[in-house]
Image: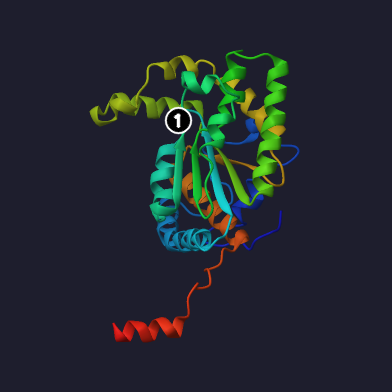
Amino acid sequence: MGKRKAGHGFTEAPEDFLVVGPDFRLDRVDPASTPGFTGGKSDGETILAERDPHLADLQERLFAEGKGGGTRSLLLILQAMDTAGKGGMISHVVGAVDVQGVQLAAFRAPTDEEKKHDFLWRVEKQLPGPGMLGCFDRSHYEDVLIHRVHNWVDATELERRYSAIQDFEAHLHASGTEIVKVMLHISREEQGRRLAARLDDPTKYWKYNPSDLSERKLWGSYMDAYQIAIERTSAPYAPWYVVPADNKWYARMVVQELLVAALERMDPQWPAPAFDIEEQRELLAQS
């Protein structure tokens, strides 16, 4: 991947130091760390607000390009353990752009209809159209994470799914979709604190699910499943970024910067007018 000049409080560009490499080990990533950033929470929140207009401008250009006949799109895939901040990421980062150009899909347990099809069937229906910023709250990776942890499929089927994901994402890239895959890496201890906070706040009861506790007991198995999935499916055209997420402000700032970097690489262009400008000026003056 090409190097991009660092800035905005980072010692280097996040897409360069958070991208998964060949020797990646999830257990070596400290979820409470803020790698590549020299400031604190207030600095991060300031940068997030200052960068919002730039992200919104780039996204508007992509949207306009699509309206003008362009075929490219951008897909942000968010994967994480419960409470890691996927919802807040969508609200505070993706929510800063024009919602007309956003396609959001949240993948939960498959319906009876979806179970009749291959695991990618429901995902293909939610892919972003031309000019759109797509955002997946969980994704096709659930089918190689939770299914592996609970032994819902055998090793042969898991291998088929890893290969299917590689082919699927390679096809997306070749078709003009830029893919940004993010694992928000939260610690088990921080998850415990966030679950406790939900039980202490009546306005957060709706977010709490007792089943989270049974999944929490399988933390080690989930970390192993993430390690394998990341190893098997990180590619130059669809790299994984593992973002420490105990500090929400840091994770949001980094994901914002990853989206900015992706859009800057795409460099979407304003479409040329499909009409004569001077003629329309004259007609407008006469109207």
Q: Horizontally, is 87 left or right of 118 in the view?
A: left
On the rendered structure, is 166 left or right of 133? right
Residue 248 lies in quadrant = top left
Mark 1, Cα crowd under 10 Å, few <14 / some 14-19 / many 20+, is some
Residue 264 percent location from the top left of the image: 58, 61
**Splitting the image into 4 quarters, where does residue 50 fall?**
bottom left
Q: Nearer the viewer, residue 187 or 215?
A: 215
Number of numbered discs: 1
Amino acid at pointer 1 = Glu
At horizontal 42% and vertical 25% (from top left) the residue drawn is 192
Residue 37 in sight here = no
For image coordinates 26% across by 29% down, the residue present is 201
The residue located at (73%, 17%) in the rendering is 156
250 with respect to 225 (left or right): left
**What's the residue at 50%, 26% (across, down)?**
188
Q: Between residues 73 and 281, which one lies in front from this camera angle?
A: 281
User: In which quadrant will I find the C terminus?
Assistant: bottom left
Q: Quadrant of residue 190?
A: top left
Q: Position of residue 274 (x, y in %)?
A: 50, 72
The reply to whether residue 141 is visible in this rendering is yes
Between 32 and 243, the one lying in front of the other is 243
Where does residue 257 sit, x and y in percent of width and height? 53, 54
The colour scheme is: rainbow
Position above or below: 122 against 272: above
Tell me: 69 left or right of 90. Answer: right
In the rendered image, residue 278, in percent from the top left (x then y), is placed at 44, 85
Q: Secondary structure at mark 1?
A: helix
* Extreme-right residue of the structure: 22
Which residue bears the numbered disc 1? 190
Q: Nearer the viewer, residue 278 or 157?
A: 278
